[in-house]
Image: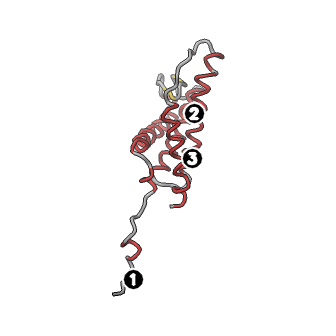
Amino acid sequence: MEEKSTAFAEFDNNILTRRRSLLPTWIKVFLWIFLIGGALSAIFLMAGSLLTNISLSVYGINANHPYSMTGLLICFLFLFKGIVAYGLWFEEKWAVQAAIVDAVIGIAICLIMMAIIPFVNPTISFTLRLELIPLYFYLKKMQSIKKTWESL
């Protein structure tokens, strides 16, 4: 007996793969954290002149105002992370490459804050940046799914 081809034949035996399904749960949780962080960062940048004291921190960089040099750096890092999270959540083709760049920037800043800044600035002491652990696994995961992500 011969099977008839229907308009829905392509869906009969194929499971539609979503790019988002390539991401593990722990990355999906961080996506939401950084979507919120990116939105807050945009708000802080827009309302920065109205804010008197707000504590900002990422990768060992601290600031008390979004319009200071370190505050702007932190806000732009969170904006970038928010854009990457948006791209990954909404399955944009460019998102994995941006996530790899995000991970490399994060690892580089952690290493600088851990190995260089304590010796240049005596007010900052050496701290072991534990963010390096999830950043490493994030980088490896994004590198491993890059080809599959871009082909879908």
Residue 121 figure quarter? top right
Query: Along the polypeptide, which appears first: circle 3 or circle 2?
Result: 3
Q: Does dot 1 land on a helix, a strand or a loop?
A: loop
Quadrant placement of the N terminus: bottom left
Residue nearest the observer in this picture, 112 or 142: 142
The crowding category of the residue bearing disc 1, from other C-alpha atoms within 10 Å (few below 14, some 14 to 19, many at least 20), is few
State the residue position of label 1: 5
> Residue type at mark 1?
Ser
Q: Does dot 3 land on a helix, a strand or a loop?
A: helix
Which of the two discs, 3 and 2, sits closer to the camera? Answer: 2
Query: Along the polypeptide, which appears first: circle 1 or circle 2?
Result: 1
Contact check, label 1 and label 2, Cβ < 8 Å: no
As drawn, 33 above or below 129: below
Q: Which residue is drawn at 51% across and 22% down?
A: 64
State the residue position of label 2: 107
Relative placement, left or right, of 89 versus 126 is left
Find residue 144 and report its horizontal and vertical position in percent: 53, 49
> Residue type at mark 3?
Ala
> Residue type at mark 2?
Ile
As drawn, 47 above or below 125: below
Q: Which residue is drawn at 50% across and 45% down?
A: 141
The outermost residue toward the right is 120
